[in-house]
Image (tube, coloured by chain):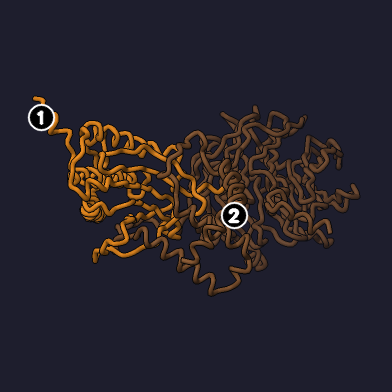
Amino acid sequence: MDAGSVNSSNKIQSRSPLQERFLHRKPSGENLDRFIPNRSAMDFDYAHFMLTEGRKGKENPAATSSPSRVAYQKQLAEAFNMNRTRILAFKNKPPTIVDPIPKEFFSSSVNQSKPAKPRRHIPQSSERTLDAPELVDDFYLNLLDWGSANVLAIALSNTVYLWDASNGSTSELVTIDEEDGPVTSVNWAPDGRHIAVGLNNSDVQIWDSTANRQLRTLKGCHRSRVDALAWNNHILTTGGMDGKIINNDVRVRDHIVETYRGHQQEVCGLKWSASGQQLASGGNDNLLFIWDRSMASSNAPTQWLHRMEDHTAAVKALAWCPFQSNLLASGGGGGDRCIKFWNTHTGACLNSVDTGSQVCSLLWSKHERELLSSHGFTQNQLTLWKYPSMVKMAELTGHTSRVLFMAQSPDGCTVASAAGDETLRFWNVFGTPEVAKPAAKSNPEPFAHLSRIR
Amino acid sequence: MASKTVAKDIITLRGSAAIVSEFFGYAANSILYNRGVYPEESFVKVKKYGLPMLLTEDEGVKSFIANLTAQLSEWLEAGQLQRIVLVIMSKATNEVLERWNFSIETDSEVVEKGVSREKSDKEIMREIQAIMRQIASSITYLPCLDETCVFDVLAYTDKDVAVPFTWIESDPKLIANPQMVKLHSFDTKIHKVDTLVSYKTDEWDEE
């Protein structure tokens, strides 16, 4: 009982710091409007703990260092508490609910792998609209491309313009002679510097955009206009109105390396897969071909890997899926209106969706499993689809004529669309670039920046 | 006529213990329902205290509460029960999220001398009704329990109570730095029950 007297004398001494702490705690912790002074409302166990444990650490650091003293105090506290009450609980615990899906596992795993993504806002109107006078309103051409150097190329009649997306400046690359034009296709090489320009007279020009200099002209590939171009390293593949597809090695004098014969009519869609192994081509003969590079080297007359006849109108819109190497999306023209998905290894059609309107162009999102399609009559809209459910996520209207061409910015976020209404519109449809975010969300510690100052 | 009303207002220790333990059974059911410890569809509606009350149909929970209230009334009659605490814990981490604290003050004179007190049933019911209403409305200020939870009941008894063989001694399962809200109390003139809920403070309040 000697301890009891020590306890009481200490209590008097410690009153003022405790009070301070008590006052300090109260406004932050309690709902003052609900405060009803009542002794039974107070948690004496907690108060007792605060009184003894709190003081121990603050005022007698020496006491805490002695383990025997700690043990003694603990024993004392226990005895003191146990003299008053005994806390009892059932040995058998109440049944716990069994979740059909283990909720805590589910939620925690989701939280750990990626914090639940906030719903992305998709602006319904275009971010920016530029005039595109004299844009040739021809479904079969490919007059818009956005290079890796963030420069957009658009062909307006006989002239190719370059629009630098980083500073908004416009420059003219080339105006071709009246009798050779108009320009029927433009395509950036992967380096973002060289650009191929296909002409109505069957020539293909290759330009260095930084030096603003023409490097060469590929002649004699086709008998008529060149509608589609696709780069695969040093190979420039051209598709013409004559139905031929030609691989040109731009480095060598005799540039024609291979000729793919399959289409009976104008070739309007050409896309190499990301690996450069497979080429998809679509034509006005409603056919879709998959060509394989390794097969093409043998000079057999039919070199195609697959020949798809499922579309019932011209196939211009082609897009290779960025997250699944053998997945191709293709869109049919006015008589078909379908987006179809293909496994290009097996040639199997995986899905077909009737969009209700001519499909002029298709783009995959680089970040999400989403596909954007551009359409003609009646809405002239851009439609964003969730893949593979093909649920419509957004319909972007604004163009007043069919949206012929689409191109994606190098960061994958902005889409440019050019339509028969002679406008070029920019849509922030695939989200905003996430560059500044991680820095802003950095350490919440107030003095985290100090180490950087030193 | 007069004698009848007088008879009704007399309350014995036994009657008081029955009222309190029954109250606790309903209160526990109501808390488990309102705090979503068990799925909504496992409860049925009954009328009690002039209110629609919900009782669990889950056999396991039912028998747990029945055993509990039986033991509680025994202790209440002996005047040995100081407090009942219903604790809600996270199933995953066992962290205590809420403590529903029912403090009981017993009139020792009644226990020792076996006298009875006077208070009308109606009045007691009205007091209990107010508590039940408060429990049901507590969801408006209590933090969301967005994880799977389990519950347990602690009984604070006098030291001299022999521990029944189905019971064990437990730690108090306190919450560090809790928020507390006092609810109404009721009084049978023999047992006075004060209700208090303490809960874990939301993290963002602290920052």
Q: Please name which of the two marks, 1 or 2, marks the residue nearer to the observer.
A: 2
Left or right position of A381 against B175: right
**Element carrying mark 2:** loop
Chain letter tied to orange: B
Which corner quadrant holds the C terminus of chain A? bottom right
Mark 1 vs mark 2, CA separation in Å = 59 Å
Name the residue located 50 percent from the left edge and 44 percent from the top edge.
A390
In the picture of the structure, the residue carrying the numbered disc 2 is: A14
Chain letter tied to brown: A
Image x and y of residue B24, in percent: 28, 46
Considering depth in this image, is A422 or A222 the residue closer to the camera? Answer: A422
**Element carrying mark 1:** helix
Give amino acid for label 2. Answer: Ser
Give the vertical position of A132 relative to A408 (above or below). above
Which chain does the residue under circle 2 lie in?
A
Give the vertical position of B89 relative to B131 (above or below). below
Name the residue located 65 percent from the left edge and 35 percent from the top edge.
A403
Image x and y of residue B66, in percent: 22, 52
Give amino acid for label 1. Answer: Lys
In the picture of the structure, the residue carrying the numbered disc 1 is: B4
Image x and y of residue A304, in percent: 59, 60
Determine if marks 1 and 2 fall on one subunit: no
